Structure formats: structure tokens, C-alpha cells
Amino acid sequence: MKLITSRQAGFSLIEVLIALTLGAILLLSAERLLPLLWQQSAAMEQRYWVREEIQRLLLLVEKAVRRAGFCQGDHCGGVSIEIKDEGKCLLLRWDDNANGQWEGPGHLHSDYFGYRHRGLAIEYARGVADCRTGQWSRLTQPTQIQVLDFRVKALAQQVDIQLTLKAGKYTLSRQHRVNREND
């Protein structure tokens, strides 16, 4: 009769202790590394949102400047672009419904538009003839992205737009020149 022996395979106590020690070292390293990764991820996200927001705002104001002065007929009179408050407010007029005239600020479908920098936000209004009155709505949320600077300057047949935004520690400035098309 042959004797059957079974040899059990497994880890020794020393091997288990070494594995636990290495695992603990890896976990401690990960614990210190994760907050840094989260901070870097948040910073990258803030940079992304600032770049997207600055592009969106510049295109929005560019579109308004290009429209300014448009009239389907001959009954539109007055100034199509006004820059007020040292360039922090832009007032525009165009024939939005193509009826041949610019409806004034009191009209339900007014053809008077405005953009201004107030606080840490860009605001927009329809039906405004000045920068201090009217129903202004925020285009940006200062809790997420702060608008540090918004300036507009007229240059012959062009308008120069300067915009500076900030989110977290990231600040971005852009300057954009737009051709006036309807004057």
C-alpha cells in the first residue's frame, strides 16, 4: 500500500506580513496622492470652463455688434452703437423683427439692446436706452466664473472687446476685434 501525502501550498507568515506592509505603503501613498489629483482635476476643469465662457461671451457680443445698425427699411434713425461708463456698457440698436424701424425702449419687441459689466458678471437687457435702468439679466454666474473686466472701445469701423474672466486661481484675458457691418 502506497502512502498518499498531501502537501498544502500557501503563503508563509513572513510572506503575508510583507504583502500587508507593501499594501499599507501603497494605500498611504494613494491617500496623499488623491487630494493632489482632485486639486489638479478641479484646476483643469476651471481652465476649461473659463475658456469656454470667454469664447461664448465674445461670440455673443460679436454677433450683437455685427447686427447693430441693421434696418430693413429707411425709418431707422439714430445712433446704432453707444459705449458708456468708460467702455463697461455697450448699447446697440438693430431692426430685430425686420419691420423697417427701431422700436424704442418702451415697446414690447424693442430693438434696443445692452450689455454691461456689473459686479463680477456680464448682464444683458432688451429695451434699454441707458446703462442704469431697465431689466438686466446675468449672462454669467459669479459663484462659478467671475468677470474681472469687460471693456468695449470703438475704432473707426471696428469695435474692440476686452474680456477678463477668473475661476478659482485661473485668470484668462482675451481681446477681440469686430467689424461693424451695418453703419
Image (cartoon, grey):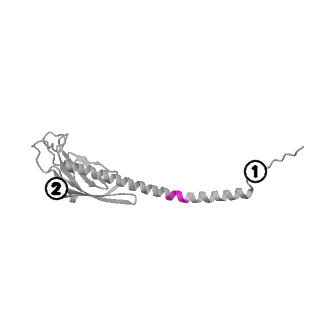
x, y (%) of residue 18?
69, 59
Q: Looking at the picture, does residue 44 appear above or below residue 137?
A: below
x, y (%) of residue 139?
30, 49
Look at discs 2 and 1 and give the one toward the viewer: 1
Residue on which the image places disc 2: 157
* Residue 16: quadrant of the picture: bottom right
Tell me which segment is drawn in magenta.
Answer: 32-36
The question of residue 34 being in magenta is answered with: yes
In which quadrant of the rendered image does the N terminus lie? top right
x, y (%) of residue 37?
49, 57
Q: CA distance from mark 2 to mark 1?
A: 86 Å
**Residue 170 has which mark?**
none
**Residue 9 has which mark?**
1
Q: Is residue 165 left or right of residue 3?
A: left
Three-letter code for the amino acid on which mark 2 is drawn: Gln
Q: Tell me how many marks there are.
A: 2
The question of residue 10 being in magenta is answered with: no
Query: For the stretch drawn in magenta, what is the main secondary structure?
Result: helix
Name which residue lies at 73% across and 54% down.
11
Farthest right residue in view? 1
Residue 121 seen in the current view: yes
Residue 143 seen in the current view: no
Q: Nearer the viewer, residue 52 or 127?
A: 52
Mark 2 nearby-residue class (10 Å; few <14, some 14–19, many ≥20): few
x, y (%) of residue 73?
11, 42
Look at the numbered discs 2 and 1 and tell me whether their residues touch, using CB distance below 8 Å. no
Q: Nearer the viewer, residue 70 or 140?
A: 70
Give the mark, 2 or 1, whose residue is nearer the N terminus: 1
Q: Secondary structure at mark 2?
A: loop
Q: Is residue 110 left or right of residue 4?
A: left
Farthest left residue in view? 74
Three-letter code for the amino acid on which mark 1 is drawn: Ala
